[in-house]
Amino acid sequence: MHIAMWSGPRNLSTAMMYALAARGDCAVWDEPFYAAYLRLTGLDHPMRHEIIAAGETDPARVAARLAGPVPGGRAHFYQKHMCQHMIDGVPRDWMDDVTNVFLIRHPARVLASFAAKYEAAGLADIGFVQQAELFDRVAQRTGITPIVIDSADIRANPEPMLHKLCSALDIGFTPAMLSWPAGGHAEDGVWAPVWYGAVHRSTGFAGPEGPLPDLAPDYARIAEAARPYYDQLARVRLRP
């Protein structure tokens, strides 16, 4: 099975990649379109030049691999995607050949975490609008509601929520998904030193999150603009 997991930044997506990789039957790919996104947009993200040099910058070639054979002959292919990477010029037709899952997180939490690393963060950078557009596209083309899972539910109840996700995907749950070795994964993107510090120190999912963070006024306005898109998907998420 090809599993495309769609989220924005700072959204438990790396921990989910580690969980799926820990199964042993799942190849993983970390943010396949990142290099192409930076080349096409010119954005000055941390490690921009290293990311472009290390990745595939032709989005058509990336798309062909995403719908192609599973690397290593494994049973499943987990693809960790950032919704904001799906700009004009990035193909979407390959999405019809994979199972699309949407990983959501409250926008205030996303902004608090992302802005600490990238102060120029705006609505387009955190992926909520794009995530809702991709969700609608999948729903319209398949005629069914795509799978949605909230990172807060996973952190509060990792094993039950991973059971529900595996059931929705029609793949077997394994307890191996609940833990991984500290220190990162061989398939981490080259940008891992900037973004993955906390998950590299982890050996499993962090516990439940506390109260919503207080945001500076500019970031609070961005979070408020993102909230309707989050709420749209949250209404149909897998329930604890």
Image (cartoon, rainbow, N blue to C red):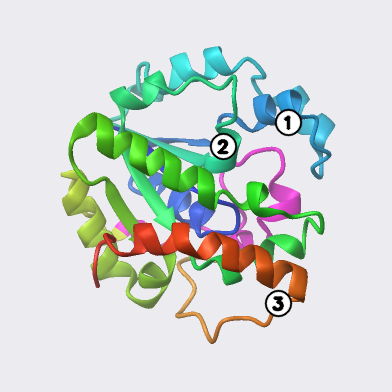
Residue 171 percent location from the top left of the image? 19, 44
Does residue 68 lie above or below 103 as drawn? Answer: above
Locate residue 60: give its quadrant: top right
Residue under the point 55% across and 30% down:
32
Q: For the residue labelled by badge 2, is the local secondary structure a helix, a strand or a loop?
A: loop
Q: Nearer the viewer, residue 88 or 56?
A: 88
Distance from the alpha carbon under mark 1 to that under mark 2:
12 Å
Locate residue 238: give its quadrant: bottom left
Q: Which mark is residue 38?
A: 1
State if disc 3 and disc 1 touch (CB < 8 Å). Answer: no
Q: For the residue labelled by badge 3, is the local secondary structure a helix, a strand or a loop?
A: loop
Distance from the alpha carbon under mark 1 to that under mark 3:
27 Å
Q: Earlier in the sequence, mark 1 or mark 3?
A: 1
Residue under the point 46% across and 66% down:
204
Residue of label 3: 215
Query: Over which residues does the magenta segment extend?
Result: 176-201
Q: Earlier in the sequence, mark 1 or mark 2?
A: 2
Residue of label 2: 31
Q: Nearer the viewer, residue 112 or 74?
A: 112
* Residue type, label 2: Glu
Residue under the point 28% across and 65% down:
161
Does residue 59 lie above or below 5 as drawn? Answer: above
Residue 22 percent location from the top left of the image? 39, 49
Say whether residue 199 is magenta: yes
Q: For the residue labelled by badge 1, is the local secondary structure a helix, a strand or a loop?
A: helix
Does residue 2 lie above or below 227 as drawn? Answer: above
